[in-house]
Amino acid sequence: MTKQGERIARRRWLIGVFIGVGILVNYVDRVTISVAAPQLREAFALSPAQLGVLFSAFSWTYALLQIPAGLVLDRYGVTRVGRWGALLWAVSSLVTALASGFGGLLAARLLLGVAEPPGLAVCSKATGYWFPRAERALATALFDAAAKFANVIGVPFIALIVVTFGWRWGFAASAALSVAYFVGFCVIYRDPSHDTKLQAAELAWIREGGATPEGAATAGAAGMFGYLVTHRKVWGLTIGYAAYDYAFYLFLTWLPSYLVDVMHMSMLRSAGLAMIPWAWATFTDLAIGGWLIDTLIARGRDESRVRKAVLIAGLLSALGILGVIGTHDARWAIAWISVSLGGLAIAGAVTWSIPSLIAPKGAVGAVSGIMNCVGNVLGAIAPMLTGFIVSATHSFENAFWVAGAIIFAGILAIVFMLGKIEPIAGPQIVRARERDAMS
């Protein structure tokens, strides 16, 4: 056991920052097509509806493979699944760079959706292994904020490459980043029990603080999945996250085009202004979704109530998307988008901390897979439905109303279905309790 006053090393934070870098690279891969959209539209004579299909195609395969990816992650572990996933990101970006038309772009986006399903679940499971419960919020916010920060540095970076060299080079650049992360993952990441650079005192600190136990689930993968999908708590989390994902993907895919088409900006100017709400979202993710939660819990506040209150407050702020309706002033549009994205960032950080807090032993991947599968079904619908609405009405206003209604439904699910944030008893424990009750 660790002794009071003993100085604890901080290798866990190096790991936390590193997996955050992975999500940053992951989201640069995703957002490149949004930045390149004006050039793609001209190069291949694409309609808004076709762009919407391309924006959402990634999420079709991404959502479909979430649950299998979660089960594979629980079976083979963070180290192996994380490595091969990163390598596949690079392959899919290179295929996109070589596309010669709508069909090729569509196939490449579907391939990216095959490559990336384990990404966030890997981070959630690794964070559970590496961090005690008292540090879990900030540790989760590190990788969740990276998804927002990717738009702060990634969008201008890719925009500069696309404007200077063309859209193909934008995808080539994102592929190079993925290769670099794959190499880094092979060199740096190990689970705590296999990390030779992790000091014994820090390992004891992590475990004594309630880190997720390493090891396989007590039930088989299929049995654990069947058990979890019957839980009200899992569905409360899942519906709340799906509401977040719908609005998040609307902004992730359509924000550059909204600023160009509605606010009549150049590609570079729109990329620069888009940095503002994404930078604010990065800040709220870390400061409120991470630091504030850990601070309140450390001061003795009830852990479950703190997390739920912050989650609900984040989703309420996300309704700021409705403030964009009717404005033609770019400053007000950016302000309301910042309010909404800031709230979404808070909600995202909290929701991604919850799988490792409620999952039975060895089942973090399964809970994450269920949550992310349903979330990305909505994430796939968002850009496609937005594209059809814009094509039919020549306006984004109805698309924003739909997003607001979905966010409100997510708030109701968190309030009435999630319940207390505590571990779900595994199926073996439940059966044992039932036997004791009958005896």
Image: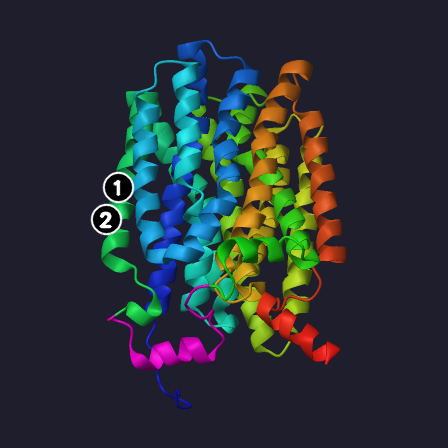
* Residue lying at the far top of the rendered structure: 45
In the depicted structure, whether residue 205 falls above or below residue 232: below
How is the protein colored in the picture? rainbow
Left or right of 401? Residue 353 is: left
Give the quadrant of the C terminus. Answer: bottom right
Instruction: Identify the secondary structure beneath mark 1.
Output: helix
Left or right of 258? Residue 115 is: left
Task: Check disc 2: other Cα within 10 Å, few if <14, some if 14-19, many if 20+.
Answer: few
Alpha-carbon distance for marks 2 and 1?
A: 6 Å
Res. 11 in view: yes
Q: What residue lies at 65% left-to-right and 60% top-to-bottom?
A: 310
Labelled pair 2, 1 in contact (Cβ < 8 Å): yes
In the depicted structure, whether residue 76 falls above or below residue 202: above
- Residue flagged by tag 2: what amino acid is it? Val
Please identify the quarter of the rendering in which residue 255 is found.
top right
Residue on which the image places disc 1: 179
Residue on which the image places disc 2: 183
In the depicted structure, whether residue 437 falls above or below residue 324: below
Please identify the quarter of the rendering in which residue 247 is found.
top right
Q: Which stretch did the figure color magenta?
A: 196-216
- Residue flagged by tag 1: what amino acid is it? Val
Q: Indicate the position of residue 9 as horizontal and vertical percent values.
A: 32, 76
